[in-house]
Image: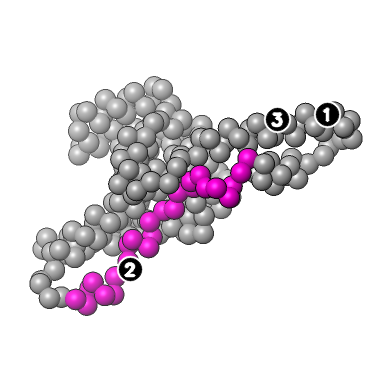
Amino acid sequence: MKQTSLKREYETALKYYKQTVWSYIRDTKLVGAQYHVALLAWERLNRAQDCWLKSLPFGDVEAHQTEPDVAKLRPNRLERDECTTPELLATLASPRLGTPKRRSFRDAVEEAHRLLVVARRYVDELPTPEKHENSSIDAHFAGNVTFKQILDRSNVADCFPLFPTVQKRRNNGKLTLRALEQAVKRFGEDSHTSEESRQKIRHVLKEKAISCKLLEEIRWDRFRRHHKS
């Protein structure tokens, strides 16, 4: 019975990760809150698979051979590297800004200078390459992400959503502030939620900001509820 329950939990975690994370990040690298939430979801899948495989009888190699290699599904982090210079980023970004009107040479130089300053600041803020263990710790203790940031990211086409919708036909498939608040509130009202978590939820609803760890817990709980129904 326990083995069946563990397998079901693993299968749900695999669907959760593939549908709400991997389908968006397969060919890209993430940074900031997106990377932290994706990594926490991957760790959930990794734990679920590990628990299920350990529950199998000794010598049962078929399951180990047929199940996907979770390590290959780990999110890739956007990190600093020697090839990505501020000058290169500024050059690549310039055409994206467009040229709505004719400018003087001085205006063009000033704009290029501002773009280079922004590019340098962006590169300085990128994380340096480090071991997986360190990035895992960072994800668990990452700072808060605001509701506005969640909504902005969730409603961009082909962008990894921090909080995906579960009913694609409602609101044209877009996440609304009301839906986000209701999901957070519902998680706080669940009978399995600890009192400590409920206090955190009340604070989250007041401040309109949430930690990456708690956000991933809620998006997992929401997916699992919808999956069961």
Q: Amino acid at mark 2?
A: Pro
- Of the residues under marks 1 and 3, which one precedes in the sequence? 1
The picture quadrant where one finds residue 69 is: bottom left
Residue on which the image places disc 2: 68
10 Å neighbourhood of mark 3: few (<14), some, or many (≥20)? few
> In the rendered structure, are the residues bearing label 1 and label 3 in contact, judged by CB atoms less than 8 Å apart?
no
Task: Judge from the rendering whether residue 95 lies leftward or rightward of residue 226; answer left or right.
Answer: right
Between the residue at mark 1 and the residue at mark 2, the CA separation in whole angstroms equals: 54 Å
The picture quadrant where one finds residue 122 is: top right
> In the rendered structure, are the residues bearing label 1 and label 2 in contact, judged by CB atoms less than 8 Å apart?
no
10 Å neighbourhood of mark 2: few (<14), some, or many (≥20)? few
Residue on which the image places disc 3: 114
The front one of 170 and 39 is 39
Residue closest to the far front? 82
Q: Amino acid at mark 1?
A: Asp
Magenta region: which residues? 61-86
Q: Quadrant of the N terminus?
A: bottom left
Between the residue at mark 1 and the residue at mark 3, the CA separation in whole angstroms equals: 11 Å
10 Å neighbourhood of mark 1: few (<14), some, or many (≥20)? few
Name the spot of residue 116 as percent of width and height, x first: 68, 35
Name the spot of residue 31 as percent of width and height, x first: 48, 43
Residue on which the image places disc 1: 107
Name the spot of residue 208 as percent of width and height, x first: 43, 26
Nearest to the eye among marks 1 and 2: give it. Answer: 1
- Of the residues under marks 1 and 2, which one precedes in the sequence? 2
